[in-house]
Amino acid sequence: MAERQIYTARLTRTETLSDRADCKHFEFEVEELSNFDFTAGQFVSMLAKNNEKQMTRAYSLASGPRGNNRFDLCLNRVDGGFFSNYLCDMEHGNVVHFHGPHGHFVLKNPLRDSVMIATGTGVAPMRGFVEWLFPLDGGPDRSEGRDIWLVFGTRHESEIYYREYFEEVARKYRNFHYVITLSRPEESWQGRRGYVQEHVKEILESRPEKGKSDMDAYICGLNMMVSANRKQLAEFGWDKKQIVFERYD
Ligand SMILES: Cc1cc2nc3c(=O)[nH]c(=O)nc-3n(C[C@H](O)[C@H](O)[C@H](O)COP(=O)(O)OP(=O)(O)OC[C@H]3O[C@@H](n4cnc5c(N)ncnc54)[C@H](O)[C@@H]3O)c2cc1C
């Protein structure tokens, strides 16, 4: 088997997305390339040594391909975990090695009306999809007029990652629908409450044949949420081929 190409990513910028959830946005540049080519939704495998042990962890690309050597990640510290803390402790200018891009969590072709379902950092590849479909920088609208819902769930209002960005996309593109739901909202929260699947259900119930013949779903996050949503879609009579998913655990 051919040796895997290992690349070097230099950290250029970070932004705290939520103090409460210890979640950060990361921007990297690939040193060996002028164009890091990938498909929105894929992941990279990050590499680092923990003492002498080689560690590898997957992280979804939180940006779309931009025709340059940059990519973003979105991740939170996991208590007692090695890699998430290693990345969160990196300083600007530091480098980390990786291979990739990898994975099949990508948009289907042809694109149909779709519901993107994410909780927590599962929003990362959805940001990549949205950046690709609905550019804010003057690039072409690639959504082909399809209705695209992003149903994002988290516990608290302070954990709504990239809220301003998605709200801006929704203002600019009438066919992008941004749905936030909180499972443990503060009393002052005026928006939707409960788990993502309850709001997915509402969307499907407003569609002919509950989306069975003309929609796709993209689901990303922890296994329990992914399973609950796959189960619900199966109960609505959806075919497995209509559902693309990525599990983080
Ligand atoms: C394809 C793929 C893409 C991924 N993309 C992302 C991403 O974009 N952002 C991101 O933050 N993570 C992502 N993950 C999860 C990531 O790879 C790591 O599992 C996570 O960062 C924990 O690694 P760690 O070394 O810090 O902890 P570990 O030492 O691996 O784990 C410590 C403990 O935490 C549990 N755990 C693992 N992941 C999580 C989690 N996310 N939340 C809560 N508990 C967890 C483990 O079961 C274990 O018990 C992705 C995983 C996969 C498979």
Image: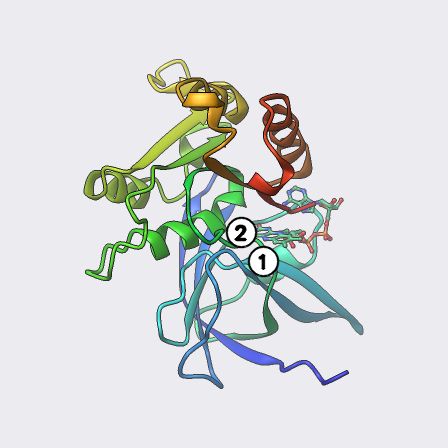
Q: Which mark is residue 144?
A: none
Query: From this viewpoint, which residue is outermost toward the right?
Result: 52
Question: Which residue is pictured at 35% across the width and 20% down the height?
Answer: 191
Identify the image quadrant of residue 160: top left
Identify which amino acid the numbered label 2 is placed on.
Leu
Q: Is mark 1 within 8 Å of ligand 1?
A: yes
Is residue 170 depicted above or below 70 in this figure?
A: above
Horizontal side of residue 212 vs 179, given as left or right: right
Does label 1 or label 2 sit earlier along the sequence? 1
The circle drawn on residue 59 is: 1
Q: Can you say which quadrant of the picture contains the C terminus?
A: top right
**Residue 127 % position (x, y):** 41, 50
- The Cα–Cα distance between marks 1 and 2, rounded to whole angstroms, is 8 Å
Vertical placement of residue 191 versus 131, above or below: above
Residue 64 visible in this rendered orientation of the protein: yes
Q: Between residue 171 and residue 78, name the one nearer to us.
A: 171
Q: Is mark 2 within 8 Å of ligand 1?
A: yes
Image quarter of residue 226: top right
Q: Could you tell me the amino acid type at mark 1?
A: Tyr
The N terminus sits in image quarter: bottom right
Q: Is residue 152 left or right of residue 50?
A: left
Mark 2, residues whose alpha carbon is within 10 Å: few (<14), some, or many (≥20)? many
User: How many numbered marks appear?
Assistant: 2
User: Which mark is drawn over residue 75?
Assistant: 2
Which corner quadrant of the image does residue 185 belong to? Answer: top left
Residue at the (60%, 29%) spot, across then down? 229
Label 2 element class: strand
Which secondary structure lies at badge 1?
A: strand
Task: Say which residue appears at 32% left-offset and 49% top-offset.
Answer: 143
Frontmost residue, 247 versus 154: 247
Marks 1 & 2, CB-CB < 8 Å contact: yes
